[in-house]
Image (spheres, rainbow, N blue to C red):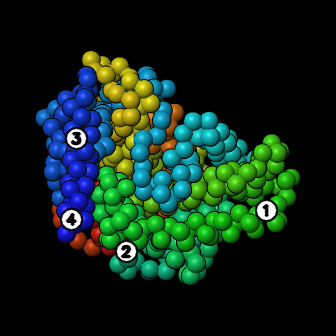
Amino acid sequence: MEVGSTTCLLLITFIFILLLMNVRKVFQKGKLPPGPTPLPLVGNILQVKNGNIVKSILKLRDIYGPVFTMYLGPRRVVVLCGYEAIKEALIDHGDDFITRGSLPSFERFGHGYGITVLNGEQWKQIRRFSLMTLRNFGMGKRSIEERIQEEAQYLMKELRKTKGSPFEPTSALVHVAANIILSITVGMRFDYEDTTFNTILLNIVEAFKIMSSFWGQLYDMFPKFMIYIPGPHRKMFKLLKYLEDFIEGRVNINLETLDVNSPRDFVDCYLIHKQQLNTSTKSDRMNLVITVMDFIIGGTETITTTMKYGLLILMKHPDVQEKVQKEIDNVVGERSSPTFEDRLTMPYTNAVVHEIQRFSDVAPLGGPHSVTRDIPFREFIITKGTDIFPMLTTALKDPTYFNDPNNFNPEHFLDDKGNFMKNEAFMPFSVGKRNCPGKTLAQTELFLLLTSILKNFHIKSLTDLNELDLTPIESGFENLPPPYELCFIPR
């Protein structure tokens, strides 16, 4: 009995110490931006309604302004809203905000490796190498653009098989996006019926659903606690282990068949680079595997969602579809495939592709940053160890830069003469030194895939256009289009 009482007393003491430590951490704010008062341990979790962190943050912005502090569990976060605040942090003071913030899910399935979560010199080296490799890939046997054009033709073949019947496009788009990034990273393309290929894709999709769910959000808020709690969040790491093992196997095959004079893919380029430096280590090998994994996940999920949203938008706006097709006919003509260079003489189509990215707002939160020392910012002091959430959605829908931010309008990227016009608040890939390294690849892919589809097909809705809803499905960290079917009518 005495042992039980002692254990109970120790447990109460331990909880009291944790609460005290958290209270001291919360109220030693200094000059942090204002925000809602957090509760011990759980922070502002009660303000995250229905697990929708994006909507909850936007409601807090309406109360506290464009720069405010909140706590996701014990994790202190300063939120930046609007183009000006994000630009001031990530561009004007980019070196102070260059560190990647906490990403517990990514850190666990990537074992702390890979371009997404790395910091310091390791991150600089692998980012520099990745940008250089993707930029110079056209000097090899097949350029990135040729790989995209090739896969676009496989997609056209799949769409012709539908013969204009109602069709749900997700599976076809996932296969196309995945094959493109797999071709670039590991030099492979799969038949759409391949069992290994479909297992990889199903695992990625399911893992991301869990990651964006309330369970996934709880894991990112309380990782040290949630590893002991049963739930679907534990499944996402098992799902992604299959992809890691697949990439590890491909790296081994590339090592056995490597020709230093003829690199076939990103993996070859990395292996040759490390051989030239004579610095290959176990850490280098893991960084390669997880960086390729990061590229495959990002290059599949984001492109698929944006493309799916794009088709829904074009179905909702047949007048836009018609104008794009007219421009394609005038510029591409009888050529079998559009080129990325065509965008320079297709200002309306270029504007539509940009507006699809802006309106779809696929990654509203962006990636978290962090500060490693006390940083003066506006009239505040952002204290060491604070994570930064640059809310990209608030830049993409900033009314100062987009006069009709909540509606789809290609005029956002056209001047009064109909020429394509850049907009500095357009940042779906984030901005600054930690922006998405696959930005150019994604832009090329979206332009070539959308123009290839519209060159060959009319997109037709099954329902009245007034009933088509563009409102995204509520999700934790990603905006997903509502489910739909459409018909691809050959032109």
The residue indicated by pointer 1 is: 255
Number of the front mark, 2 or 4: 4
Q: Which class describes the residues within 10 Å of circle 3: few (<14), some (14-19), or many (20+)?
A: some
Give the residue at the far front of this rendering: 2
Query: Which residue is at the front of the view, 295 or 26?
Result: 26
* Residue 390 quadrant: top left
Q: Which class describes the residues within 10 Å of circle 1: few (<14), some (14-19), or many (20+)?
A: some
Q: Earlier in the sequence, mark 2 or mark 4?
A: 4
The residue indicated by pointer 3 is: 20
Say what secondary structure mark 1 lies in. helix
Q: Amino acid at mark 3?
A: Leu
Number of the front mark, 2 or 1: 1
Instruction: Tell me how far mark 3 sits from mark 2, CA to CA.
Output: 53 Å
Q: Is residue 85 left or right of residue 117?
A: left
Instruction: Tell me how far mark 2 sits from mark 4, CA to CA.
Output: 65 Å
Residue drawn at (54%, 56%), measured in percent from left and top?
A: 111
Residue drawn at (42%, 53%), measured in percent from left and top?
A: 104
Asked whether the beta carbons under mark 2 and mark 1 sit within 8 Å of each other, the answer is: no
Q: Amino acid at mark 1?
A: Leu
Number of the front mark, 1 or 3: 3
Instruction: Tell me how far mark 1 sits from mark 4, CA to CA.
Output: 63 Å
Residue 195 visible (yes or no): yes
